[in-house]
Amino acid sequence: MARRSVRSSKRSPSSAEPPTLPLGPVPIDTGTAEVVPDRDHAGRVTLQVNGVPSSYLDLDDPGFLAFEYMQYMDAVVAATLPGPLRALHLGAAGCALARSWDAARPGSRQLAIDVDARLVQLVREWFALPRAPRLRLRADDAAAAVATAAPASYDVVVRDVFAGDATPGHLVTQQVARQVAAALRPGGLYLVNCADRPPLERARRELATLAAAFGPDAVADGRLVLIAEPGILKGRRYGNLVLAAVRPLPATDDTDDTDDAEVDRGGDDGGAVETTSADHDALPDLRSAALARALRALPAPAHILTDDELARFAGTARPF
């Protein structure tokens, strides 16, 4: 379960007519969804899917992010990827992160995937999400969406898929991680929300899996890092850890670097919408002092593991 802390986006409230929200649970394909108002903050709501908090949104402020792991992801992107984004979100729910990036980065083109077709329809109605081509929603299995993505078509891929309190096993494999790497343009970023509890065996194995998929030098080159609160890293409690991996540039990349366009003909928006990756010629610097400072300055300060510290944390963990 994601923890919540306040991080203001300093945006002006929207003047749009507020949407009509449901009272109580609503049936969806995978169970129930419920929009729970925050009693302490007017206009803020939690989307619960089968009783689990899946998104928290400020209906008047699209840039607002409450879940701490989303703040970590946002800090990584802010420090490493300039300009508009081509983003693929595996796990849509209420699209809080996609909504925030749309507000902060005009010109971005994003695709959010959720396995529940009814939920995809409802969140469009409830939360007045950006329309295509800014944000497209598609009902699909996340692994299938990655497998069919065009090569080098995204700047960032976010994995935030849960069944209960864990990511489904078929999404944590080396095969999926390699397919994500192929879908990223060179220098593109893969962000993973890993929920784990002491002794953090799952997080260690996820690190080993990403190291295997993104290249043997991913740790040494600073292309793989882990971010979490110190208390979680010390094994004191269950919580969310963010793993970030960067696809290498063509000089060290054996995969197809063709900058093809992706055409999405599914989803609730209909029609064919083409998106192409942005042009970048340098690797994001995940070891920068600026990123470390930004993470420490968050409402729930986080620590970033890199290089030897990351290697010691992963230890001899086996890839999935």
Image (cartoon, helix red, strand yellow):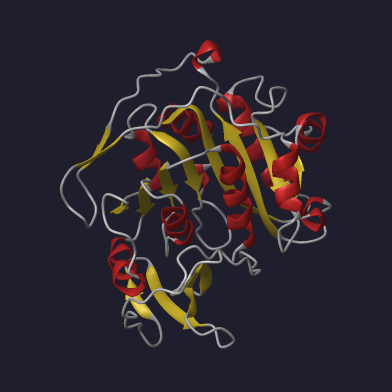
Task: Determine whether, in the image, residue 107 is placed left or right of residue 246.
Answer: left
Q: In the rendering, at what x and y percent does residue 134 appear?
A: 32, 51
Comparing 32 with 107, the one in front is 107
Q: Tell me the residue at 51%/52% (across/down).
A: 160
- Say whether residue 110 is left or right of residue 268: right
- Up the image or down, 214 lies above or below 79; here it is above
- Nearest the camera: 161 or 98? 98
In this rendering, the answer to whether 7 lies above or below 185 is below
Could you tell me which residue is drawn at 71 percent across and 41 percent down? 290
Instruction: Look at the picture and state if 182 lies above or below 52.
Output: above
| Viewer-side residue, 84 vs 320 | 84
In the rendered image, which quarter is residue 9 located in? bottom right
Q: Position of residue 19 (x, y in %)?
A: 32, 79
Q: Is residue 319 visible?
A: no
**Hey, which quadrant is residue 225 in on the image?**
top right
Q: Residue at x 36, y 46 (%)?
A: 107
- Asked if one can make out residue 86 in the rendered structure from this viewpoint, the answer is yes
Where's the C terminus, which quadrant? top right
The N terminus sits in image quarter: bottom right
Residue 223's quadrant in the figure? top right
Residue at the limit of the structure toward the left, as seen here = 271
How many marks overall?
Answer: 0
Would residue 246 appear left or right of 109 to someone viewing this image? right
Residue at x-position 35% and y-position 42%: 145
Q: Position of residue 181 (x, y in %)?
A: 48, 29
